């Protein structure tokens, strides 16, 4: 038996902790032993359907109370799990159906496991010749014991949230999960007896599925898990659950903390929530904006939120989840550097005067992981030299499942090219500047879209997280950019003109370059991945 599965099954019987789901309407708690017994029934149903060791199973389900035993039941059969991206009210359903079909075919899924609220997709999938199983029917099967598994078996095929190209799935092995889980729990000083995890992160994303469902289930930790739709319907449900369950740990992307800060100011009254129990609020999955963190700390102070609880982090599916995060209890650390030297000479030189850029330190690499920075020729760069971030270690995936077959992720020495630009500080802490493919080059300067988008987002009327910088004339000598923003007043000509002028002004003040044009759009127009990341490449048609 692999260490991952054996430990998970053992902890299910030893732990008194469990999974709390169904908030806010129908809260229910299952101990991990109860989850395990439900998983044995799921495994029985999968066995009856012919699912066995080495098979791939796709899952389209929304409720954590169903996803947890389904995932464990799949692993009991020695199979791999792929969480299919879930459609939302703003999803193009035709495009989603095409992408979902491509994914299921790519992984050669033995079966598709489905549940509400996605049952309407079942006839479509069956018409395509796929074996469709409902979670309800699987839970009615007779329980069986798990098959033997190996450390090298693939446990998860995690769909990437990249913005371009054909679908691909990161192969996460049992050994990858064990290595990263151990590193993360040490890095965050996890205490199985006292820590309570609260999460609304989607299970089709690596942070939500691996970090905030699989790892707690593996260790048998106390977990409160709701859905992203629950969070979007009522942002204040998040602090409500932290207060109710005395949550000590949570995680979210930067945009969610920005949204929470706004809601606390506008809709909550001081003392309505007690957030003093929270010691670990990880910010990851997208670039951390120091202004947003500072705003959250200010907004949360009257609710007991501690500044030192905010933990900026760096990670990706290719490293299972986490690469690095700030020192536990250390809060956010900002590295302020000369903006001109950063863009022209690719050096992160500390500065406090003139035009500076404030970047967030993402901590030292976790145990079992190495990070290096390389230039365009692959040579190692010294501290504060800006180049491509590469990662090596036990949690790093072997490679991808793609429509063209297996593609290795590591070079001959085990290094994985993240595609991120960044540097290491003198003390070895990771700092990310942006994505290689997104950098806008003007007059020999590197301009990072995240800086442009952050500046545009400061304009009153621009929806949080709904500004995108689009590179124009990429690859030519006169490269430039445009900015698209979403605004509720998109149909008001006077308001549109104001937003356009102010966005152009804020962007110029931030990067010293004016956008070629600014476009104000209806809410929901800017394309995003299922995990909420901007699809910059797909936004070109909006500004051209």
Image: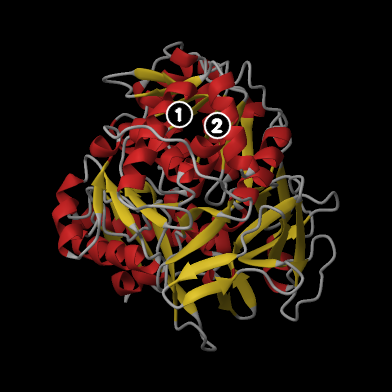
261 above or below 433?
Answer: above
Residue 6 in percent (x, y) is at 60, 36
Please give left or right for residue 137 compared with residue 143 in the image. left
Q: Is residue 220 visible?
A: no
Q: Residue 36 bears which disc, if any?
A: 1
The one of 365 and 233 positioned closer to us in this rendering: 365
The one of 208 and 11 positioned closer to us in this rendering: 11
The mark nearer the N terminus, 2 or 1, is 2
Q: Classify the position of the C terminus by image quarter.
A: bottom left
39 above or below 490?
Answer: above
- Where disc 2 sits, the SS reads helix
Please give left or right for residue 245 compared with residue 342 in the image. left
Q: Answer yes or no: do the residues labelled 2 and 1 have beta carbons within 8 Å?
A: yes
**Corner quadrant of residue 378:** bottom right
The one of 106 and 277 positioned closer to us in this rendering: 106
The one of 544 and 105 positioned closer to us in this rendering: 105
Kindly identify the residue that appears in the image at 76 percent across and 46 percent down: 364
Q: Classify the position of the N terminus by image quarter.
A: top right
Q: Residue 9 bears which disc, if any?
A: 2
Kindly identify the residue that appears in the image at 38 percent across and 68 percent down: 106
- Where disc 1 sits, the SS reads helix
**Corner quadrant of residue 521:** bottom left
């Amino acid at each position: 038996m692999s260490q991952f599965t054996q430990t998970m099954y053992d902890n299910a019987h030893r732990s008194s902790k469990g999974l709390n789901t169904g908030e806010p309407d129908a809260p229910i708690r299952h101990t991990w032993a109860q989850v395990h017994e439900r998983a044995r029934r799921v495994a029985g149903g999968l066995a009856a359907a012919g699912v066995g060791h080495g098979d791939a199973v796709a899952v389209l389900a929304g409720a954590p109370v169903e996803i947890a035993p389904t995932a464990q039941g799949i692993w009991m059969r020695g199979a791999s799990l792929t969480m299919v991206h879930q459609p939302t009210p703003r999803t193009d359903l035709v495009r989603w159906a095409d992408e979902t079909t491509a994914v299921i075919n790519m992984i050669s899924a033995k079966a598709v496991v489905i549940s509400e609220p996605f049952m309407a997709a079942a006839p479509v999938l069956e018409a395509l010749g796929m074996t469709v199983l409902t979670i309800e029917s699987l839970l009615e099967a007779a329980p069986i014991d798990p098959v033997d598994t190996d450390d090298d078996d693939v446990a998860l095929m995690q769909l990437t949230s990249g913005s371009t190209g054909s679908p691909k799935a990161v192969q996460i092995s049992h050994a990858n999960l064990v290595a990263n889980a151990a590193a993360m729990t040490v890095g965050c000083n996890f205490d199985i007896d006292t820590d309570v995890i609260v999460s609304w992160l989607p299970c089709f994303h690596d942070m939500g599925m691996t970090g905030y469902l699989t790892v707690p289930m593996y260790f048998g930790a106390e977990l409160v898990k709701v859905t992203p739709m629950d969070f979007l319907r009522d942002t204040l449900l998040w602090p409500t659950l932290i207060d109710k369950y005395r949550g000590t740990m949570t995680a979210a992307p930067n945009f969610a903390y920005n949204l929470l800060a706004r809601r606390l100011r506008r809709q909550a009254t001081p003392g309505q929530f007690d957030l003093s129990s929270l010691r670990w609020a990880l910010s990851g999955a997208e670039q951390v904006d120091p202004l947003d963190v500072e705003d959250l700390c200010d907004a949360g102070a009257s609710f007991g939120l501690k500044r030192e609880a905010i933990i900026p982090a760096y990670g990706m599916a290719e490293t299972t989840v986490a690469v690095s995060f700030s020192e536990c209890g250390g809060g956010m650390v900002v590295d302020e550097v000369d903006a001109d030297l950063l863009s022209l000479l690719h050096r992160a030189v500390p500065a406090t005067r003139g035009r500076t850029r404030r970047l967030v330190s993402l901590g030292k690499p976790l145990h079992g992981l190495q990070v290096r920075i390389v230039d365009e020729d692959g040579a190692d760069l010294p501290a504060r030299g800006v180049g491509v971030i590469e990662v090596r270690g036990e949690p790093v995936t072997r490679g991808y499942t793609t429509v063209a077959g297996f593609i290795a992720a590591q070079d001959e020495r085990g290094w994985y090219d993240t595609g991120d630009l960044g540097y290491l500080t003198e003390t070895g802490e990771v700092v990310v500047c942006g994505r290689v493919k997104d950098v806008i080059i003007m007059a020999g300067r590197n301009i990072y879209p995240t800086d442009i988008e952050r500046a545009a987002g400061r304009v009153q009327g621009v929806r949080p997280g709904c500004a995108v910088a689009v590179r124009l004339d990429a690859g030519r000598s006169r490269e430039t950019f445009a900015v698209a923003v979403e605004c509720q007043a998109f149909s008001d000509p006077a308001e549109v003109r104001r937003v356009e002028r102010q966005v152009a002004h804020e962007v110029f003040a931030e990067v010293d370059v004016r956008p070629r044009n600014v476009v104000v759009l209806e809410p929901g127009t800017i394309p995003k991945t299922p995990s909420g990341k901007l699809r910059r490449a797909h936004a070109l048609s909006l500004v051209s």
